[in-house]
């Protein structure tokens, strides 16, 4: 059962709606301006950086419990979202995990090539590895919503190029199918307080007639997923994107890639963005435990 706090917050959430008079630029600015001056949690410092020409933000906890580095791809449907929108959440993640988080400001669609988010994310990873800043075993890929598409398309590309893979992947409310073929788009339509099927179908306009909606570049659910590192998928039982996490978990398993799926009762899309939720604390603890298990050396 969901917490009483979550039920209170749910009543305050304003569901997204289609606004034909609002440009994509205005939509981006609205979200970025709302979050730009948001305070960071105590115990975390930040530092801007450019790695391989890509703008990034380091979120550095005061107390480290691991040398692992989390490279993070923000959500926003590949067309919105930015460092500023996800800075507070990634700071919270850094403090909760006791690990450095590197938030990547990748180029967005539709004004850039469809592979631009993936290539920027990989460029940062390559730079860190090639300069011996860290080893692949010390890296975790993570993302929320469409950031999950960025992370998985990056993983598949790494495997194709026979480059070293990170140690693990974590996705919060992953959006892995731009064709919107999951059944939760309909059977969760009356439960999701944040998103509506109409908003998601309108979002497809940024891709339709320019690329197949099932192309693995933007829909990694349909990629060859063999040989990938352990994955933790966290999803909300009331979110429209629930089917994507369920199907990704099943697809990874069928390809022999280890995966763990955790569905939180009555939670909506990317609920960990609400720091006051007990379910957010639970999610952070689960991620921490998962990463500790990955780090733990095998015993004989």
Image (cartoon, grey):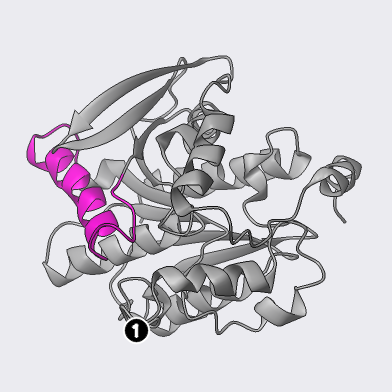
- Indicate the quadrant containing the C terminus: top left, top right, bottom left or bottom right: bottom left
Which residue is pictured at 52% across the width and 62% down the height? 174
Which residue is pictured at 34% across the width and 35% down the height? 102
Give the x, y percent position of residue 296. 40, 45
Question: Please, is residue 124 above or below residue 198 in the view?
Answer: above
Give the x, y percent position of residue 165. 23, 57
The answer to whether residue 291 is left or right of residue 276 is: left
Which residue is pictured at 52% across the width and 26% down the height? 95
- Indicate the quadrant containing the N terminus: top left, top right, bottom left or bottom right: bottom right
Residue identifier under label 1: 212
The answer to whether residue 215 is left or right of residue 20 is: left
Q: Give the camera-side residue of 110 and 183.
A: 110
Q: Residue lying farthest left?
A: 130
Give the x, y percent position of residue 202. 56, 71
Q: Residue lying farthest front?
A: 21
Give the x, y percent position of residue 237. 73, 65
Q: Give the camera-side residue of 98 and 19.
A: 19
Q: Give the camera-side residue of 26 and 288.
A: 26
Examine the image and state in which quarter residue 156 appears.
Answer: bottom left
Residue 120 within the magenta-colored segment of the rendering: yes
Q: Give the camera-side residue of 9 and 23.
A: 23
- Disc 1: CA contacts within 10 A as few (<14), some (14-19) or many (>=20): some
Q: Which residues are magenta?
A: 106-135
Q: Secondary structure at mark 1?
A: loop
In this rendering, the count of numbered labels is 1
Examine the image and state in which quarter residue 280 appears.
Answer: top right
Question: Please, is residue 83 above or below residue 166 in the view?
Answer: above
Question: Please, is residue 249 above or below residue 154 in the view?
Answer: below
Which residue is pictured at 50% across the width and 35% down the height? 32
């Amino acid at each position: 059962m969901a917490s009483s706090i979550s039920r209170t917050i749910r009543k305050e959430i304003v569901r997204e709606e289609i606004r034909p008079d609002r440009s994509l630029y205005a939509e981006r600015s609205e979200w970025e301006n709302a979050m730009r001056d948001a305070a960071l949690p105590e115990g975390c410092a930040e530092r801007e950086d450019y790695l391989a020409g890509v703008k990034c933000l380091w979120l550095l906890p005061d107390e480290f419990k691991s040398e692992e580095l989390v490279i993070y791809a923000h959500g926003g449907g590949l067309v919105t979202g930015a460092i500023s929108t996800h800075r507070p959440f990634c700071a919270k993640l850094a403090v909760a995990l006791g690990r450095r988080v590197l938030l990547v400001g990748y180029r967005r669609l539709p004004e850039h090539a469809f592979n631009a988010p993936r290539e920027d994310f990989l460029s940062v990873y390559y730079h860190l590895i090639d300069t011996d800043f860290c080893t692949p075993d010390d890296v975790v890929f993570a993302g929320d919503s469409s950031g999950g598409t960025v992370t998985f398309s990056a993983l598949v590309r790494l495997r194709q190029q026979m480059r070293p893979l990170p140690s693990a992947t974590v996705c919060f409310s992953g959006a892995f199918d731009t064709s919107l073929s999951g059944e939760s788009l309909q059977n969760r339509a009356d439960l999701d307080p944040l998103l509506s099927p109409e908003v998601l179908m309108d979002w497809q306009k940024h891709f339709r007639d320019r690329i197949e909606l099932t192309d693995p570049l933007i829909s990694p659910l349909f990629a060859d997923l063999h040989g990938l590192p352990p994955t933790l998928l966290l999803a909300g039982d009331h979110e429209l994107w629930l089917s994507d996490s369920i199907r990704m978990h099943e697809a990874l398993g069928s390809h022999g890639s280890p995966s763990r799926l955790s569905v939180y009762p009555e939670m909506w899309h990317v609920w960990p963005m609400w720091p006051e939720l007990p379910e957010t604390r639970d999610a952070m603890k689960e991620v921490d435990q998962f990463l500790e298990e990955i780090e733990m050396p095998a015993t004989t």
